[in-house]
């Protein structure tokens, strides 16, 4: 079978390979994977390494080796952790990570199979008549399934675990995917028909909902740009990138190197990186311009690219020789630390936020009018003093991270303002007075459906939306919700933005694509005093913390209620733990943390000496797989794993 990696076809045939030195069948714990290597490091893999995937749980990069019939698993320092063999005549092509089960799926272009990998082990081989030269594979959060493009039949198959749950006919020779949360659509490049098929992410098998978008010649790589909410399509034979929206708009094109193969969104630089095979370059694109070009080794044949979010670096595969090259500077996280470690914050720390670029935790301290910034080892990186806020009487309450500009937003429920922070510096303050202003702002959350930040106004029963596309942002709209809204969360499965209303004992579900349209709202009855919400990718459900019922309601964004789970006394906040697939719930009065999986409490953390800590806010650090819990009474931040 022939695998096209450039305009010229590269003939692939099985090549015998011996065991690589340094290979290990045992996984290294994530805590040992902090990488401190130079920017241009590289490591050897198998023959013709293709299109890799990053596993945010183990912090591994999975590299299919097309001519060696196997898979190389690398850590963040480009060291070989393990090799997974697939057998003779196999042709592994692309890998994709599934956050529902924390498994990696690998397409086999030659044998019409998909392999399922757990950590470093092959746990399943899926052979199906629905596969025909399977090429790309990616997770669709809109329907919580893995999508597999069939290069040989012009179709896409959808998998849940190891089961095929549906198909969709697309264009000719479909290749790679991108999920567009702004429009709630799943896109696949159709290399043979010079277009992109945009599918409805919440029902990707709905053929009638498909939109065909013409682009350049031989479109292959594709990536969603979270900053401008647009999709970047690498056109193999046009030597350019077409910038589109998932509903058909075309914004222009950008010239890159020869034979652009793959693309990825780089959160650290807020750019789309495109790899060109013939010129051995990586083009860093922002808006409609190439802002930087990285030139790899001569004749390297750069092919695939993946972003390692734990280390903020690119892993680029090269076929000649068979290597993986690292580009970008690693950010030291100084963690993880022993579970139960604590560090001192200010007085009455509130709802904290995690910054995935600097790998820092932002803790607003309501009664000392400052903001503490900690790294992954619970070490104080910086303190933003009252003088950089509005003043001594400031009461910073909650923080949220915005991926469109790598800023952190913190609300102030004394001055009814929102602070905009870049790194460790306050760069602006938003009052919102042009639309009535904030009124006792409480929780905040980012809504990728419309690329806005929602701010819950507990004093006026409204949510204010901040547009963040340029500068520090500005208020775009207000909507009325339930009584005393306190927290918000985004549900990608239903494409809804959820608001917990404390005194009306319900959740307002807002259409994330049209969040300003109140007529589309759905009100969902929950327990008494809903105060926080966390979305669980593992079962596509929302966990609503009911502070006055000592329970958690499990719902979805369309109104279905699955039941309730009893937790500790006065539960306050919740977060999803990607590493374990669990929901962590802080219990303010009982000084405990309830760990939920599905509809059960599977573990209760009772820290020694912290019974009066007053656990409130909680954030998940994806670089160290730890949760950071604020203690409002003890003025401490606690770290648990």
Image (tube, rainbow, N blue to C red):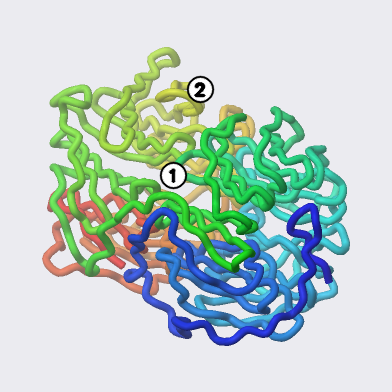
Query: From the image, which quarter does the N terminus lie in?
Result: bottom right
Q: Is residue 558 visible?
A: no
Residue under pointer 1: 268
Residue 355 x, y percent position in the rendering = 36, 46
> 262 and 345: which one is in front?
262
Q: How many other residues sit within 10 Å of disc 1, few (<14), some (14-19) or many (≥20)?
A: many
Q: Secondary structure at mark 2?
A: strand
Q: How many other residues sit within 10 Å of disc 2, few (<14), some (14-19) or many (≥20)?
A: some
Residue 208 x, y percent position in the rendering = 85, 46
Q: Is residue 224 visible?
A: yes
Q: Secondary structure at mark 1?
A: loop
In this rendering, position of residue 185 left or right of residue 591? right
Residue 284, image quadrant: top right
Establish if 19 lies above or below 281.
below
> 159 and 313: which one is in front?
313
Q: What residue appears at the point 35 percent right and 59 percent down from the top-left corner?
A: 585
> 56 and 371: which one is in front?
56
Establish if 560 lies above or below 166.
above
> 369 and 253: which one is in front?
253
Q: What residue appears at the point 86 percent right and 64 percent down from the top-left corner?
A: 152
Establish if 356 lies above or below 88.
above
Q: Which mark is residue 477?
A: 2
Q: Which numbered disc, 1 or 2, marks the residue that appears first in the sequence?
A: 1
Residue 440 x, y percent position in the rendering = 31, 28
In this rendering, position of residue 399 left or right of residue 274? left
Query: From the image, which quarter does the C terminus lie in?
Result: bottom left
In this rendering, position of residue 118 left or right of residue 487? right
Extreme residue toward the top, this view = 434
Residue 375 x, y percent position in the rendering = 25, 52
Establish if 379 lies above or below 431.
below
Q: What residue appears at the point 51 percent right and 48 percent down from the top-left corner?
A: 525
Instruction: Mark 1 vs mark 2: give the one in front.
Output: 1
């Amino acid at each position: 079978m022939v695998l096209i990696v450039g305009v010229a076809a590269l003939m692939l045939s099985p090549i015998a390979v011996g065991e690589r030195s340094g290979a290990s069948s045992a996984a290294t714990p994530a805590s040992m994977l902090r990488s401190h290597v130079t920017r241009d490091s590289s490591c050897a893999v198998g023959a013709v390494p293709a299109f890799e995937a990053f596993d945010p749980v183990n912090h591994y990069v999975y590299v299919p080796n097309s001519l060696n019939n196997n898979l190389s698993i690398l850590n963040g320092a480009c060291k070989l952790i393990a090799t997974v063999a697939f057998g003779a005549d196999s042709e592994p092509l692309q890998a994709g990570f599934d956050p529902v089960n924390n498994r990696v799926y690998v397409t086999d272009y030659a044998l019409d199979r998909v392999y399922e990998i757990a950590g470093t082990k092959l746990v399943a081989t899926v052979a199906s008549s629905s596969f025909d030269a399977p090429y790309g594979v990616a997770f669709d959060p809109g329907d919580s399934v893995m999508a597999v493009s069939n290069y040989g039949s012009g179709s896409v198959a959808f998998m849940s675990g190891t089961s095929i749950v549906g198909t969709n006919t697309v264009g000719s020779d479909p290749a790679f995917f991108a999920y567009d949360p702004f429009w709630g659509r799943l896109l696949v490049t159709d290399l043979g028909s010079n277009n992109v098929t945009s599918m409805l992410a919440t029902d990707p098998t709905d053929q009638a909902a498909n939109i065909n978008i013409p682009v350049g010649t031989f479109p292959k790589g594709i990536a969603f740009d979270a900053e401008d909410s647009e999709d970047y399509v690498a056109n193999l034979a046009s030597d350019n990138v077409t910038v589109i929206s998932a509903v058909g708009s075309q914004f222009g094109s950008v010239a890159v190197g020869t034979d652009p193969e793959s693309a990825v969104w780089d959160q650290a630089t807020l750019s789309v990186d495109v790899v060109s095979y013939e010129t051995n370059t990586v083009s860093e694109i922002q808006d409609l311009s190439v802002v930087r070009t990285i030139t790899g080794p001569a004749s390297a044949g750069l092919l695939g690219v993946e972003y390692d979010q734990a280390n903020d670096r690119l892993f680029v595969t090269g076929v000649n020789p068979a290597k993986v090259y690292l580009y970008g500077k690693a950010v030291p996280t100084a963690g993880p630390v022993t579970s139960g470690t604590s560090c001192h914050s200010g007085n009455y720390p509130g709802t904290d936020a995690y910054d995935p670029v600097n790998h820092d935790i932002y803790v607003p301290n309501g009664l000392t009018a400052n903001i503490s910034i900690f790294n992954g080892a619970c070490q104080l990186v910086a303190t933003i003093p009252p003088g950089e806020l509005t003043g001594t009487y400031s009461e910073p309450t909650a923080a949220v991270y915005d991926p469109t500009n790598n800023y952190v937003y913190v609300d102030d429920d004394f001055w009814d303002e929102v602070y905009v922070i870049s790194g460790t510096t306050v760069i602006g303050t938003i009052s919102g007075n042009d639309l009535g202003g904030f009124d006792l702002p409480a929780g905040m959350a980012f809504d990728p459906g419309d690329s806005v930040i929602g701010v819950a106004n507990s004093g006026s029963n409204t949510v204010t939306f901040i547009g963040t596309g340029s500068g520090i942002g500005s208020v775009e709209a207000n909507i009325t919700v339930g009584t005393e809204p306190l927290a918000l969360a985004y549900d990608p499965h239903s494409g809804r933005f959820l608001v917990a209303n404390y005194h009306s004992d319900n959740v307002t579900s807002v259409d994330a694509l049209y969040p300003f349209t109140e007529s589309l709202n759905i009100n969902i009855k929950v327990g008494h005093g809903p105060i926080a919400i966390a979305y669980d990718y593992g079962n596509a459900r929302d966990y609503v913390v009911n502070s006055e019922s000592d329970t958690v309601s499990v719902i979805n964004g369309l109104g279905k209620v699955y039941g309730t789970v009893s937790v500790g006394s006065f539960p306050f906040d919740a977060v999803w733990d990607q590493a374990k697939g669990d929901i962590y719930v802080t219990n303010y009065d009982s000084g405990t943390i309830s760990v939920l999986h599905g509809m059960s409490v599977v573990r209760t953390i009772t820290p020694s000496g912290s019974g009066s800590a007053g656990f409130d806010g909680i954030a998940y650090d994806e670089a160290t797989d730890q949760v950071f819990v604020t203690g409002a009474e003890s003025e401490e931040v606690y770290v648990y794993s």
